[in-house]
Amino acid sequence: MKVVVTGGAGFIGSHLIDRLLQEGHFVTNIDNFDGFYSESIKRRNIEGHMKYDNYKICEIDIRDKKGLDEAIPSNIDVIVHLAAKAGVRPSIEDPIAYQEVNVTGTQN
């Protein structure tokens, strides 16, 4: 199966990708490595994925429709959308940014 995972460098996404790769699926991981959580932790989360020939990482923001169109293969079977801007308090301080990522990014 060909799977696209958005937010695949995060805790949940990276563990999902671990399992998908172990099962032999082809995985495209789309993540922008947002600084809300440590980028170094996210990079460590995906370190083990790099050894798989059936794995591709694309550092793209989900708000970038053109970038997504170029990164997502046309013959995919499944998209697992886990990308989002996290945190309730910061969303109150900057609601527009959260709307752009969590709503517009999802629509892309």
Image: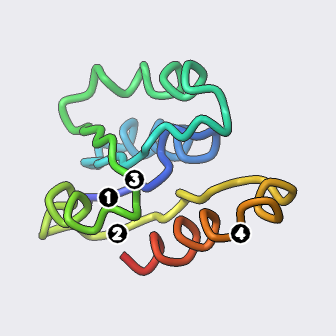
Earlier-in-chain disc, 4 versus 1 = 1
Q: In what element is the residue under mark 1?
A: strand
Looking at the image, residue 74 sits to the left or right of residue 77; the answer is left
Task: From the image, tell me which residue sits under label 1.
Answer: 3
**Badge 4 or badge 2: first in the primary sequence:** 2
Taking 92 as reference, is 48 above or below it? above
User: What quarter of the picture does the C terminus occupy?
Assistant: bottom left
> How many angstroms separate mark 3 from mark 4 (CA)?
17 Å
Callout 4: SS:
helix
Disc 1 to disc 2, how far (Cα)?
5 Å
Q: Nearer the viewer, residue 106 or 27?
A: 106
What crowding class fits label 2: few (fewer than 14 Cα within 10 Å), some (14-19), or many (20 or more)? Answer: few
Residue 78's label in the rendered image is 2
- Cα–Cα gap, marks 4 and 2: 30 Å
Q: How many marks?
A: 4
Q: Residue at x 33, y 41 (%)?
A: 59
Q: Earlier in the sequence, mark 2 or mark 3?
A: 3
Location of residue 103 with respect to 75 vertically, above or below: below
Nearest to viewer (mark 4 / mark 2) = 4
Asked if the residue under mark 2 is in contact with the one under mark 1, i.e. CB atoms within 8 Å, the reply is yes
Q: Which residue is mark 3?
A: 61
Asked which secondary structure carries label 2, the reply is: strand
Q: Residues within 10 Å of mark 4 (few under 14, many from 20)?
A: few
Earlier along the polypeptide chain: callout 1 or callout 2?
1
Mark 3 and mark 1 lie on one chain; the one further toward the N terminus is: 1
Q: Is residue 35 positioned above or below 6 on the image?
A: above
Picture coordinates of residue 5 (x, y %)?
41, 55
Name the residue located 87 percent from the left edge and 56 percent from the top edge. 89
Q: Quadrant of residue 37?
A: top right
